[in-house]
Amino acid sequence: MANHCFVTTRKRFKHEAVTADLQEINERRFNGALLIEPYEATESNYGNGWMIGVVGCHDWLNINCWLTTSRKFELRHGPGGDIRWWFEFCIQNDLALKYDGWISDGGVEGRWKGKENYLLTFADHLERMYPYHHAGNKMFLIHENLKHLPQELREKLGDKMGEFPEISKEQENHWEEQLKAVAKEWEERQ
């Protein structure tokens, strides 16, 4: 079963209003890098919702979210790594702020309120995700995240990407060699 996160509020979510809210979040937080497509409830889906695509990316990065009730917004976590999680965290945080709601997650105990100025850039998100990693390991994680982002998405996000340390070609080659060695060792164990 997939992990889901929720924003629950005493106010009422309305599909048209949340569509406008998602568009506003998209423009303000992501420079319009998300493609938001509303859909209506049918027998085969959960409720009125949204399929959110990402500029320059294939379906693996799509985000599916919907209104479970008029007071509960639900978002299905999925693959896509840190960039997708950053999009998801920002969406749930900003909706919780707008609707004075509580955030909860199927994979984490408790519930919490949204925060102002939360994860303003992708770099902020990576710092939050990997705060205790050794500097060299953190640089590798940043490199791997950036390497897989389509150029079109990086350009669209622009300043929302944040500041990243420069990675030398020598360091990049070193990491590639290490990855190949680990893959070879893994293959030999099979």
Image (tube, grey):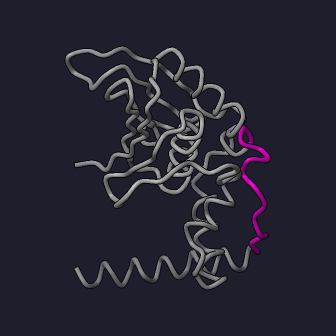
Between 144 and 94, the one lying in front of the other is 94
Q: Residue 29 at what x, y percent from top left?
A: 69, 40
Q: Quadrant of residue 30?
A: top right
State the quadrant of the C terminus: bottom left
Q: Residue 141 at what x, y percent from top left?
A: 58, 70
| Residue 163 is covered by the magenta coloring | yes
Q: Residue 162 at what x, y percent from top left?
A: 76, 56
The residue lying at 37 percent from left, 23 percent from top is: 70
- 185 shown above or below 60: below
The residue lying at 37 percent from left, 33 percent from top is: 72
Looking at the image, residue 152 sits to the left or right of residue 104; the answer is right
- 57 shown above or below 105: above
Residue range (magenta): 155-168
Between 110 and 17, the one lying in front of the other is 110
- 188 shown above or below 85: below
Q: Residue 140 at what x, y percent from top left?
A: 61, 74
Looking at the image, residue 180 sits to the left or right of residue 134; the answer is left
The residue lying at 22 percent from left, 49 percent from top is: 1
| Residue 150 is covered by the magenta coloring | no
